[in-house]
Image: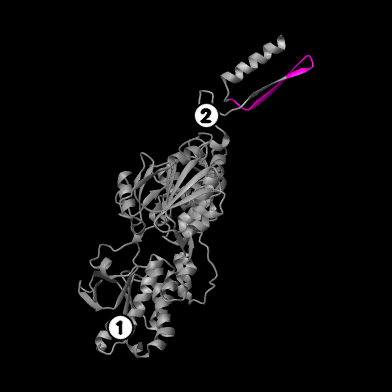
Amino acid sequence: MNGLSLFKRASRAFDDYPTLAKLIVVCTVSGGGYVAYADANSTSGAHAIAPVSEIRKKKVVVVGTGWAGTSFLKKLNNPSYDVQVISPRNYFAFTPLLPSVTCGTVEARSIVEPIRSIVRKKGVNVSYCEAECFKIDADNKKVYCRPNPDSSMNGEEEFAVDYDYLVIAMGARPNTFNTPGVVEHCNFLKEVEDAQRIRRSVIDSFEKASLPTLSDEERKRILHFVVVGGGPTGVEFAAELHDFVNDDLVKLYPAAKDFVQITLLEAADHILNMFDKRITDFAEKKFHRDGIDVRLGSMVVKVSDKEISTKVRGNGGEITAIPYGMVVWSTGIGTHPVIRNFMQQIGQTNRRALATDEWLRVEGCNSIYALGDCATINQRKVMEDIAAIFKKADKDNSGTLTVKEFQEVIDDICERYPQVELHLKSKKMRDIADLLKMAKGDVAKEAIELDIEEFKKALSEVDSQMKNLPATAQVAAQQGTYLANCFNRMEEAEKNPEGPIRFREEGRHRFRPFRYILILYKAILPLSVYRCLAFLHHA
């Protein structure tokens, strides 16, 4: 009877709670046996437990397939995410070689890789949608998209995508500075299609110049190629075009040789002004020897179908009209309209790019990250946290700080505020003790003690070393890799933070902040020195 009673109780329990688990109970009664069985095949009820496979994964939406977005996708290997990629471009392009595509040195198919091929072999669930993001709704965690005009029947099939984490990596667009006529008459060099269009335009210019009905003056205009912008892209294209014309085209069009002219317009005092002055001087001298006309201090004010108008600084504001056959505009980057609207939505007005913290999170949006050309890191200043740093280092609450106390937190300070280390290097100081000693005066290192005002004085010039990162492919690629590594270790870092001390709060940051490392590669292609430098700046 006892055995039957136990069986009844077990059966009643399985009937009442069939969702708890699959369970087999074997009850032996006087040498015999009863088997009780329950199958968790119901998904309803207060006691239901979802199978592991049905646990909801965090959804990560990646907008953009450039250097930042693609690097993130390549390095993300945590299977606990569902990833949705949204971009109007279904391939990744190796943009540093776009100038080479314009002249046929490299074929376009050699610098592209389909996104679907990149994500196909990954262990993470990644899907791709060829569409354009036109609105970001941070409050409701949605992005609104529309298909490409070519893939849409009527261009009105808009749709929304929910996200838990949003990674904005849509890059930037060419900056025209609202100069009249630029959009209508100039070529840009941001996409593969741009490079192919320029290549066709160069060949068409030589074909037109070969027509017998043209005057020499008209041939000279048609074969005048103007490059606006003396940055890496403009310099690289001008160099590639020079080689293409002199090594190949003059052999096919010998009569056009004496009419070809290449002009580089730069509004600043030097080309490649983001590099060392020796590099700038070398590039300018090399262009001069090659016959490339470099015009410094020339600001373009208007572009028509046959002339480009420039105003030379220091020339009394006089405007000069330059006849041209083709113009390539490469004067930096501007903000996409969707990014500008999003910045207004979150209160980031009057900026050229989205402001993020050192962990690439958009300021004011904990679940949104931005990287690449569409964002800039807003490095926190030491002087903003100087009181908190002093308090954290002053462990004995004496009101003064010794060298020993400061050295205990110096690694966290240098990691959280990289400008400190840059300042020490610029002043040729061996360690932080030298900086403190300079503020205190002629005192032995062991005897240095600083109060809060003396501590502020010691670090007052540190923030002058802060610099924005360049908008290059190398920076974007490193940011994508960094963010993917953070996502891969998100759960682990929540339990065991690995970042620097939180000076204003307790504990540590989950991750170390992003740090850009300039990597110099050996040039594989037989490019000239100045083009290698431009390539290194992008690669």
Query: In the image, 17: left or right of 365?
Result: right
Q: Position of residue 534 (x, y in %)?
A: 45, 69
- Residue 271 seen from this side: no
Going 29% across and 78% down the picture, which residue do you hit? 325
Image quarter where the N terminus lies is top right
Q: Main secondary structure of the magenta part?
A: strand
Q: How is the image coloured?
A: one colour
Query: Helix, strand or loop at disc 1?
Result: helix
Q: Position of residue 474 (x, y in %)?
A: 48, 61
Q: Position of residue 492 (x, y in %)?
A: 57, 40
Which residue position holds label 2? 43
> From what the image shows, is residue 307 above or below residue 499?
below
Question: Within the magenta stretch, is there residue 27?
Answer: yes
> From what the image shows, is residue 356 above or below residue 47?
below
Which residue position holds label 1? 208
Residues in magenta? 20-33
Q: Between 12 and 375, which is closer to the camera in this rendering?
A: 12
Query: In the image, 379: left or right of 186?
Result: right
